[in-house]
Amino acid sequence: MSNKVSIVGAGNVGSIVGYSLAMQGLAHEIVLVDRDPDRAKGKALDMSHSASAVRSHSIVSAAKSYKDIEGSKVVVITAGFPRKPGMTREDLLFKNAEIMRDVITNVREYAPDAIVVTVSNPLDAMTYTALRVGKYPRNQVIGMAGILDSARMAYFIYEKLGYGAGQIRASVIGGHGDFMVPLPRYSTVAGVPLSDLLTEKEIEEVVERTKHAGAEIVGYLKTGSAYFAPGKSTAIMVEAILRDSKQIHPCAVLLDGEYGVKNVVNGVPVMLGKDGAEKVIEVTLNPCEREQFRKSTEAVEEMINILEDKFFKD
């Protein structure tokens, strides 16, 4: 099995993905694709030096063209356009859908069998766009969000408790954004249910902070958004695919009847392996959680309908 990985978009998130994979020696060949070739070359050289320092066998290179992604087992897509003043959410949706269409057209041509991991925002809609443009089977395109959101929730639980770092398992499903669905009932500290350790009020505070964690970071950085945690979360997905580990992670996938939803991308627990999203895991949701999940899928469905009406018909 090939363990070549290509990363489209050598910005902050894409760079962290490449660096994480190179440091672990998970991929022998890592290819950076970027609209700025010099940026890709510089970062590739720097990462290769880092890999050499830790005696990793990973070699990082910059693509001269999309042809260089041939033979990739995994293609990670982080390329996207940031929302600028005066842009509506719909403007951003169409702009990034155009970028995704261009990227997927090339990925389909040069690495048709690659598992595609999408990171570009709006995440759920871009994952749908990749599936739609590439006419992929649903297992082949997976969106990164749930691992990141769950990690953020786990850290906020630690902040409340002041102990348990590394032993906290938090669970978040649903869309990436305002309609994510943190699941305190499925969150534990060394196997101890969260409800035994925190009050309802404290748990609600953790949930709300998790939902707005990205905005909180943007507020501090002023000129950018998070990239260390998104990049590492993506690398964790790539590792599970390359190692065929069959590990379960929350990821954005196209639902086909699971949770009572069809033809909508949303975050759910998924078994990851060499064939991508090999199995969707259905967890039991109580009425409140099910209602939150319904709102999450409806929010994504609204974006999908806009794309179908105004983007794919152009």
Image: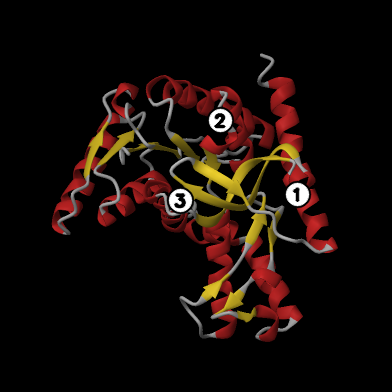
| Residue type pointed to by label 2 | Ala
Mark 2 crowd level (few <14, some 14–19, many ≥20, 10 Å Cα): many
SS label for mark 3: helix
- Residue position marked by numbered label 3 in the rendering: 237
Q: Which residue is more in the foreground, 122 or 24?
A: 24
* Quadrant housing the C terminus: top right
State the residue at coordinates (48%, 26%). Answer: 104
Estimate the x, y position of residue 312 in percent, counting from the top left. 66, 19
State the residue at coordinates (28%, 46%). Answer: 27
Mark 1 crowd level (few <14, some 14–19, many ≥20, 10 Å Cα): some
Question: Mark 3 vs mark 2: which is more N-terminal?
Answer: 2
Compared to 132, does 203 lie above or below? below
Q: Which residue is more in the foreground, 96 or 313?
A: 313
Residue at mark 1 to residue at mark 2: CA–CA distance: 22 Å
Q: Which residue is more in the foreground, 245 or 135?
A: 245
Left or right of residue 35: residue 257: right
Q: Can the viewer see residue 139?
A: yes
Q: Which mark is residue 130?
A: 2
Q: Which mark is residue 259?
A: 1
Residue at mark 3 to residue at mark 1: CA–CA distance: 23 Å
Question: Mark 3 vs mark 1: which is more N-terminal?
Answer: 3
State the residue at coordinates (45%, 58%). Answer: 229
Q: Can the viewer see residue 218?
A: no
Question: Mark 1 vs mark 2: which is more N-terminal?
Answer: 2
| Residue type pointed to by label 3 | Met
Foreground mark, 3 or 2, reads 3
SS label for mark 1: helix
| Residue type pointed to by label 1 | Tyr
* Quadrant housing the N terminus: top left
Estimate the x, y position of residue 188 in percent, counting from the top left. 60, 76
Foreground mark, 1 or 2, reads 1
Foreground mark, 3 or 1, reads 1
